[in-house]
Image (cartoon, rainbow, N blue to C red):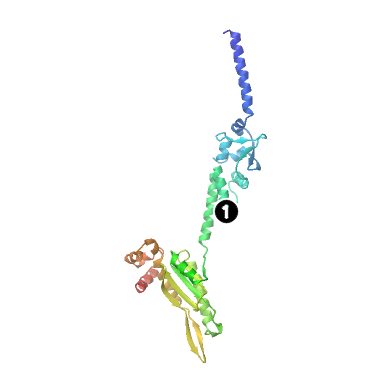
Amino acid sequence: MSAEASVGSSAADSAQSTISQHVFQNSGEFRNQGLLGSKYVKLNVGGSLHYTTVQTLSKEDSLLRRMCNGITEVTTDSEGWIILDRSGRYFDLVLNFLRDGSVPLPEDRRELDEVLKEAQYYQVQGLIQHCLGAMQKQKDVLETVCRIPMITSAKEEQRMIATCRKPVVKLQNNRGNNKYSYTSNSDDNLLKNIELFDKLVLRFNGRVLFVKDVLGDEICCWSFYGEGRKIAEVCCTSIVYATEKKQTKVEFPEARIFEETLNILIYENSRGLGPGGLHLLDSRGAGSSLGAGHSEEEGAVGGDRRANHR
């Protein structure tokens, strides 16, 4: 081949390469690989349009960064908008997190779940941890809330006690009787029983199920259940006779009520032990049967009463 032919062939190859490169520059694939050389990015997220910078999208090692540096292929429309087939409802939140490193999250749990899903899709680890932390805080708050079921029927009570895996303390409080038939200090004692119930709910929240009952004839009566059966009862009402009429006397045996509440704790983990679980508790002694976190005084009380419950 002559020198002139060789030079001509090289020039033709060079021209063809230039044309091919020009065509490649106009393709979406090249625009994807060339985002790092750009300053601004146009994103169409499920019809929601967002205009941001490559610097913002590249702040975390995420799907968005890999879209900018060409590792992940993107789809663009004829106007240069990058198409993301996701809901655009929370994409502003994702962008704001990348900009500032933190962002207010919705308090509604369902919305928070949706934000977490978007963060997981875009693989923004900082936002994922932010969402998980907010969910844990919500869970901690819910666990500190004291919920007290109100018994509305005998069947409901039986089912609740039979299926509950915790010990149950029930306060029956029914003021259906004429209050003027009470003795002079009965009203005060009735209120003291209710106040003690509230204090015990707060102290043993999460360990014992406390329920209120407004049915039946008893004005004030405490019942204690373990493994679905009644273990003890403290009735706080009695009948006394005054001149020409009988009166209802409401008492407040605080020490006995508190003692029975401590006693019922020996049934706290019994259902998880299977058949004969309480015998295993008995063989371990009073201190260990009540579990960690109880005082020696509480353990001693539980040990003294356990023989009476058998």
Q: Amino acid at mark 1?
A: Arg
Camera-side residue of 283 and 276: 276
Instruction: Quadrant for residue 272, please give it.
Output: bottom left
Q: Is residue 135 above or below residue 252?
A: above
Which residue is label 1 attached to?
110
User: Could you tell whether 253 is left or right of 19 in the image?
Assistant: left
Q: Is residue 190 visible?
A: yes
Spot occupied by residue 226 in the image (x, y as percentages of width and height)? 41, 68
Spot occupied by residue 208 in the image (x, y as percentages of width and height)? 45, 66
Q: Is residue 59 above or below residue 163?
A: above
Instruction: Quadrant for residue 45, please give it.
Output: top right
Q: Identify the residue at the far top of this view.
A: 2
Numbered-mark total: 1
If the image is split into quadrants, where does the N terminus sit? Answer: top right
Q: Identify the residue at the far bottom of this view.
A: 244
Q: Is residue 261 visible?
A: no
User: Could you tell whether 48 is left or right of 136 in the image?
Assistant: right
Residue drawn at x 54%, y 53% as measured from the top left: 134
